[in-house]
Amino acid sequence: MGTAIIKMKIMPNSPDANLDEIEEKAKEIIAKETKSEIKTEKEPVAFGLNAVILTFTWDEDKSIDNLQDNLKKIQNTSSAEVIDFRRAFG
């Protein structure tokens, strides 16, 4: 098919969780599945809790479910979800 641009949101299980460590582990997991550049940012959620947002490209023919399950297994992570999935043009 084509290439999609994926935006994933990883929520830590507490405001005290080390976001840099979660970010690095997530980038390692994603890098095993795609050769894409991975853009990261931290987004304030509420009461001192911040989420890690990762943006990368993904082959539309591949399922994202396994990647999402692996990201949920990162220590001190409560959830990982796709928040945006768009077809890349160009």
Image (tube, rainbow, N blue to C red):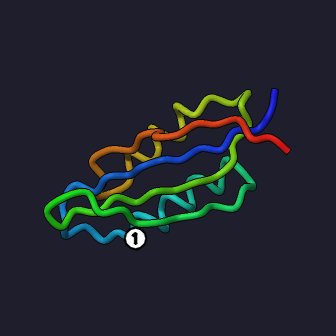
- In which quadrant of the rendered view does residue 31 lie? bottom right
Location of residue 37 by image quarter? bottom right
Residues 56 and 25: in front is 56
Above or below, 79 against 39 in this view is above
Q: Position of residue 33 (x, y in %)?
A: 67, 47
Residue shown at the point (53%, 47%) measured from the top left: 7
Position of residue 61 in the picture relative to residue 53 (left or right): right
The residue that disc 1 covers is 21
On the image, the x and y values in percent for residue 42 come to: 40, 66
Question: For the view shown, which residue lies furthest in the right direction?
Answer: 90
The residue at 58%/54% (across/down) is 55
- Residue furthest out toward the front: 90
Indicate left or right for 2 with 36 as reference.
right
Give the vertical position of 74 relative to 2 (above or below): below
Judge the density around disc 1: few (<14), some (14-19), many (≥20) Cα neighbours within 10 Å.
few
Give the position of the N terminus as an image quadrant: top right
Quadrant occupied by the C terminus = top right
For the point 69% across and 42% down, which residue is it?
Answer: 58
In the displayed structure, 14 sits above or below 20; it is above
The residue positioned farthest toward the left in the image shown: 47
- Report helix, strand or loop for mark 1: helix
The amino acid sitting under disc 1 is Glu
Residue 10 picture location, percent across and down: 38, 52
Q: Residue at x 71, y 35 (%)?
A: 87
On screen, residue 20 versus residue 47, left or right, reads right
